[in-house]
Image (cartoon, helix red, strand yellow):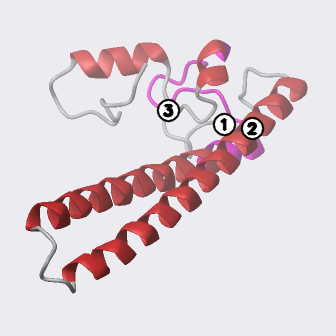
Amino acid sequence: MTQQEAPVNNTPFSSEELEHFGERLNEELEDAEEKINSFEDRLSEIESKLDDTTSSSAHHQGNIASSEEEREKYYSMIEKQKEKIEEIKMAQDRIEAGNYGICDVTGDPIKKERLEIKPHARYSVEAVKSANNVEADTEINVNEPV
């Protein structure tokens, strides 16, 4: 069941619980944005150093390669945080639509304990485990931790 197919006000949570999860999502969003800023600052430092090292023939190519590798690592971490921000925004939309806490695959409620750990979770533990055991293509990102 996709988010669009889920009926409005289908959430298994009370308004107080939804408010709590809304706050958790806001905290996660702020954390992800702070991480992006930190990673971008670090990238700027690396790129500045890289500009200095590439302009000097005295620097070893191995050092330049290490800087490139570190740079790629930060780009990857920034991308992961941006993906997380999108997931958080979709979860906030689900709260507004009244279908927060419903598994996108099974249509069953996602356990509160899972949402405490990952408030932007779209899938129940059972759906993730099932997808990890299925070799065929599924709608679930099978790399999602349980």
Left/right placement of residue 143 relative to residue 20 reads left
Q: Position of residue 13 (x, y in %)?
A: 78, 22
Which residue bears the numbered disc 3? 104
Q: How many marks?
A: 3
Q: Do the numbered discs 1 and 3 sit on residues whose CB atoms are within 8 Å?
A: no
Vertical side of 49 occupied by 76: above or below? above
User: In the picture provided, is 140 more to the left or to the right than 95?
Assistant: left
Q: Earlier in the sequence, mark 3 or mark 2?
A: 2
Q: Identify the element where label 1 is drawn.
A: loop
Quadrant position of residue 76:
bottom left
Task: Give the residues in magenta.
Answer: 90-112
Mark 2 = which residue? 98
Q: Give me the disc on residue 73.
A: none
Q: Residue at x 55, y 57 (%)?
A: 38
Please state if 86 lies on the left or on the right of 91 as rendered. left
Cα–Cα gap, marks 1 and 3: 12 Å
Earlier residue among tags 2 and 1: 1
- Cα–Cα span, label 3 and label 2: 14 Å
Q: Is the magenta region chiefly helix, strand or loop?
A: loop
Q: Which residue is at a point 48% across and 27% down the rendered structure image?
A: 123
Q: Give the mark nearer the N terminus: 1 vs 3.
A: 1
Indicate which label's residue lies in the foreground, 2 or 1.
Answer: 2
Helix, strand or loop at mark 2:
loop
Contact? badges 2 and 1 (CB < 8 Å): yes
Spatial CA distance of label 2 from label 1 is 8 Å
Residue at mark 1: 7
Q: Badge 3: how crowded within 10 Å, few (<14), some, or many (20+)?
A: many
Magenta stretch: residue 111 in it?
A: yes
Q: Quadrant of residue 136?
A: top left
